[in-house]
Image: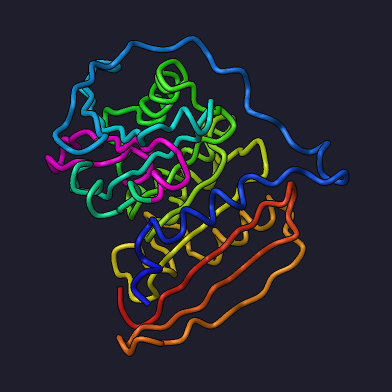
Amino acid sequence: MKFFFKPVSCISFLFLFACGGGSSSSDAEIINPITPPTPNDLPECNPSGYEKTFYCTYTRLGLDREFYVYVPDDIFSKTANPPLLFNLHGYRRQAIDFLGYSGFQILADEDKFIVIYPQGSILPSSGEPHWNDTGWSSESPADDVDFISSLIDWSLTNYQINPNRVYATGKSNGGKMSYHLACNLRYRIAGVASVGGTMNPNTYSSCNPSHPTPIIHIHSEDDTVVPIDGNWRSLPLTEMMDYWNTYNACEDSRVTAITDENNDGESGEVFLNYACLNQVETNYFLQKYGA
């Protein structure tokens, strides 16, 4: 059952669930993304050595920032305004490694969307790359909400992306940051998919979404770094699920068992919540017996 823990295995669901039009009963409650602001400073980009991938650098709010952007061939012959996906690595990880691990290039080629792999800045206390979701990393000098917002501006100018179809996904600290973006770039992030990263208490207490938000979350019940029962850095999984189900006004739900069909000792459950505002869904995959 390991394919459930590859971010690429769930993002196609996110694109599907984020595209529904509202019904007549919920349209009045939908707030559409605002008109994009004036673009920020432009990064300098060069071929990365990886196919169809550019490596970009620039200085933002006094910090040197870097990211990779993957642009499928003939994307603009298929769509004038492609979607954009941010793929956020975990704590202590590198964007270039996550580019290879997550495997979004194949899906981006098939469905014609652009992928940006941002690099987290160094947390001074540890010397390791991180995302500042204002929880355990509150000492961080980085404003990563501003960083991602500036990359949306840049993508609007350079790739004419669809501002209503900007998504965030990530693993662990990157997943936490994805939720933080949904709460703090609420007019700009259409949906979120997280692997092993729940909302931190600060994000939860200050979250103020502006539109129904499709959510996909994947987690192992054996995770000791971000336990499903929560800790001072992480909200309990069920509490987070309840928050988004309530916010999205989901009226129906069901639980489906995932059997161990390939005898790898792993199984799981899928918690599907549907009949939500604007036809979005919130889905949670809980893996049992291994990460």
Colour option used: rainbow
- Foreground residue among 143 and 53: 53
- What is the x, y in percent for residue 266? 36, 83
- What is the x, y in percent for residue 134? 38, 39
Question: In the rendered view, would you say 2 is above or below 22?
Answer: below
Residue 247: say if magenta: no
Classify residue 153 by image quadrant: top left
Residue under the image location 24 percent in, 54 percent down: 101
Residue under the image location 15 percent in, 42 percent down: 128
- Foreground residue among 181 and 153: 153
- What is the x, y in percent for residue 262? 35, 86
Quarter of the picture holding the C terminus: bottom left
Is residue 214 found left or right of 56 in the rendered image? right
- What is the x, y in percent for residue 71? 34, 33
Task: Tell me which segment is drawn in magenta.
Answer: 107-136
Residue under the image location 73 percent in, 55 percent down: 276
- Foreground residue among 202 and 113: 113
Residue under the image location 38 percent in, 57 percent down: 7
Residue 115: say if magenta: yes
Quarter of the picture holding the N terminus: bottom left
Question: In the rendered view, would you say 77 is above or below 9?
Answer: above
Is residue 82 found left or right of 42 in the rendered image? right
